Amino acid sequence: MDRLFSPGAASANTGGFDTLFTALSILSILIVLLVGTLIVVFSVRFRKGSDVPRHRVPALHAREFEIGWTIVTAFVAVFIFWWAAGYRITDDKVPADALEIHVEAKQWMWKTQHPSGAREINALHVPRGHPVVLRMSSQDVIHSFYVPAFRLKQDVVPGRISTLWFEPTETGTYPIECAEYCGTDHARMLGEVTVMEPELYAEWSAAQPEADTLARQGAALFTAQGCSGCHAAASSVHAPPLEGVYGRPVALADGRTVLADEAYIRDSILMPRRDVVAGYEPIMPTNFDEILSLGEIAALTAYIRELGGGLPPDARVLRSPAMETER
């Protein structure tokens, strides 16, 4: 029956979506049948010339019916919202071991980059049975990354990095489409996801032309853009150290504690005055949004992530040396 409503399922993400879609379709059909049946019955029963008493004045209010119908409708709406929101919240949790691939949308193509540095255009090779997370950005207008066989669709908005993850379960080739009108050649913004066995994917990745990984590109940017002048270990400037910061809690000047994830690092580059680390002055320039592209910010994030990695959840909160001395 699933094939009647949607293409074949090729990822672990499809189960909840298909169940929800089927349930909403059945509910919609039942409502249409109910309303249609009532229209037909009333049209026949109260047609002109039918033998129905017409001298009685109908009641203008049926409070019990109105209250009951409102309660039932509200319950159904809240239940559907709870079900759909619960599915989305659960589905948004990216596995820790996910393979990270960066996707850049541009009129009218999809450009992808693998951890090894391998690049593709309108194509994406992934291993079967392993979670894959896509970090997506747009160079120009709003696009929407859509893979029907995976039940995935995510808008890609300029000035923002969108995240989407999936776990392919079936080998094969599946179409990528743009589900947001993005210009005259929108219909031609197509691509393919090729799901391969893990060993074949490893062979394919090793056979690609050598290229700098995203982290190596970030390391070059870290020096070229002057970041090392303040954040390097030997720097004389009083700035937060970045070694091992990724994935650990950071104490802020306003008393809050945040997790140093991709979003925090990106926001700290673009809006450095918003989340100032406790014990440090807000001396970082605020114009990096005019200097760095989203792709360069993604490269810097990848580099910072590799500077020692994260610590266990019970590790101490990042604080300034002065704060540690005070303690």
Image: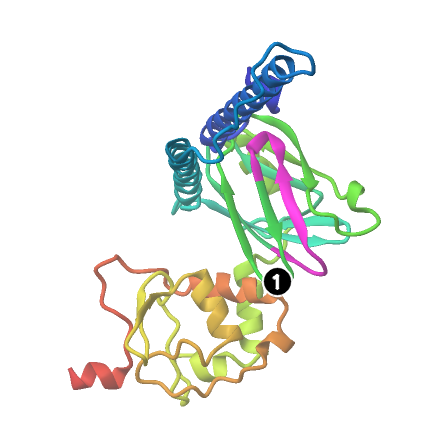
Pointer 1: what residue? 295
The answer to which image quadrant residue 74 occupies is top left
Most distant residue in the right direction: 184
At x 62%, y 36%, the residue is 147
In the rendered image, the vertical position of residue 182 relative to residue 272, given as above or below = above
Residue 93: x and y in percent read 40, 46
The local crowd at label 1, few if under 14, some if 14 to 19, many if 20 or more residues have their Cα within 10 Å, is many
At x 58%, y 61%, the residue is 160
Q: Amino acid at mark 1?
A: Gly
Q: Look at the image and tell me in which quarter the N terminus lies.
A: top right
The image shows a total of numbered marks equal to: 1
Q: Look at the image and tell me in which quarter the C terminus lies.
A: bottom left
Residue sitting nearer the eye, 88 or 296: 88
Residue 267 inside the magenta-drawn segment = no
Residue 27: x and y in percent read 50, 25
At x 26%, y 57%, the residue is 312
Residue sitting nearer the eye, 221 or 312: 312
Q: Is residue 190 left or right of residue 149?
A: right
The answer to which image quadrant residue 76 occupies is top left
Q: Is residue 324 left or right of residue 133?
A: left
Mark 1: secondary structure = helix
Residue sitting nearer the eye, 82 or 133: 82
In the rendered image, the vertical position of residue 130 relative to residue 309, given as above or below = above
> Magenta part of the protein: which range?
137-152
Q: Is residue 84 left or right of residue 108?
A: left
Residue sitting nearer the eye, 229 or 276: 276
Residue 147 inside the magenta-drawn segment = yes
